[in-house]
Image: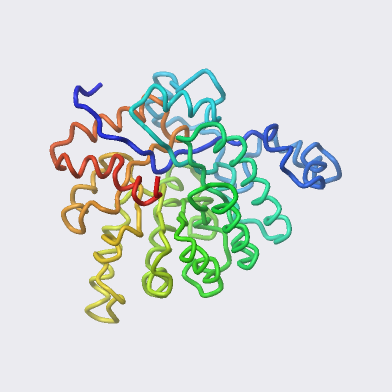
Amino acid sequence: MTTKTAPPIVDADGHIIESLDDMFEFLDPAIQKTLTGGGVIGQAMQLSKGSLFGTLDGVHFTNVSGGTSSAAVERGRINASEHRAGSAEDWIALLDKSPIERTVLYTTEGLQVGKLRNNDYVVSMCRAFNDYMANCYRKKDSRIHPMGLLPMQDPSRAVLELRRIVKELDMPGAMIPSTGLDLHLGHEYFWPVYKEASDLGCVLAIHGGANVNIGINSFTQLTPSNIVHHPVPLLYAFVSFVYDKVFEQFPDMRVAFLEGGCAWLALALDRIQRAAEFTGAPPRPIEEYLSSGKVLIGCEGIDPTLPYLAGRVGIDSFAYSSDYPHEVDFQAAMEEIDETLETDVLSESDIAAVLGGNARKFYNL
């Protein structure tokens, strides 16, 4: 444990783990019936809970061929509490015993919302999820700031839901799936949502999601899929927002790019610079987007590429993201904070900005 005094810390990207029991009351009655095993689809869902065939993306299955486990697995996982990991009670315990003062929480199951194709269903599910987040997380502790889900498949209804999320449910904004949708995120089809976000001055977060239709469908192992299926879609989204002029059209919209680290930005900067020499410059220098206070990029503490990027584009758009309780347990999340505090490659003001100041301003906490 570091001896340095931590600045006020804000977690820009933590996660809930959904409880179907707790979410049940917010679901449409037809979905409740299916969930409890009613009808053929309900029976199939019940079977899938104990399936040995993995999840429907065909990748997230048990590793039977050995390989290196995470440090948390090797030493035994240490959660923040004895409560269910990712529950509101678990997060309250984490906030009580850590230097993290506030956390912004994202879905786990809903990361694959972009794969859904029945618009009525996805609208209903997003509404139920948002009610669940408001009642079972936001109302439990003022330090917890859950993010909603939007049915981006139906932009007109996504606009209404975003307004409800911000105005009625007291959330900072909503997550947009980085994968699964039929169109790239800068496409004009989605612009009504971006206009509403700009008018509300709220946050839209593009978050790493399912590994579908991004060129890795034939991958057969979890590890190589995990290396690319979060950062690559963030690169796609950022480049499309720049060149489709989404940032120009909706200047008050705030966009977070989360769960892919920050190294993808170095690739984007190099390729944008190269493209400017041959095919066309972006509407504005990329540094202007990144220093505007309207873009946030999550990093797991002192990512190896962060000092380079801070020197190249400044520190204003980078923020610590715990990812608890996904890839890290409580101990690992605290170690990442300690490593950031102890680094000698960032100034004290840069460390304070990454660990809390940038996220606090961006999310308006």
- Examine the rendered structure and indicate whether residue 320 appears above or below residue 288: above
The answer to which of 59 and 75 lies nearer the viewer is 75
For residue 134, what is the image quadrant? top right
Q: Is residue 97 left or right of residue 150?
A: left
Q: Residue at x 48, y 27 (%)?
A: 92
Q: Residue furthest right?
A: 39
- Examine the rendered structure and indicate whether residue 188 appears above or below residue 203: below
The answer to which of 288 and 59 lies nearer the viewer is 288
Question: Residue 219: horizontal and vertical position, in percent?
Answer: 49, 50
Q: Residue at x 75, y 41 (%)?
A: 45
Question: Residue 19: horizontal and vertical position, in percent?
Answer: 64, 33
Q: Residue at x 73, y 44 (%)?
A: 27
* Total tally of numbered discs in the picture: 0
For residue 341, what is the image quadrant? top left
- Image quadrant containing the C terminus: top left
Q: How is the image coloured?
A: rainbow
Q: Residue at x 62, y 39 (%)?
A: 54
Q: Residue furthest front?
A: 167
Q: Is residue 29 left or right of residue 351?
A: right
Question: Residue 108: horizontal and vertical position, in percent?
Answer: 55, 41
- Examine the rendered structure and indicate whether residue 115 appears above or below residue 359: below
The answer to which of 91 and 15 lies nearer the viewer is 91
- Image quadrant containing the N terminus: top left
For residue 244, what is the image quadrant? bottom left
Q: Is residue 309 left or right of residue 243?
A: left
Question: Residue 201: horizontal and vertical position, in percent?
Answer: 44, 60
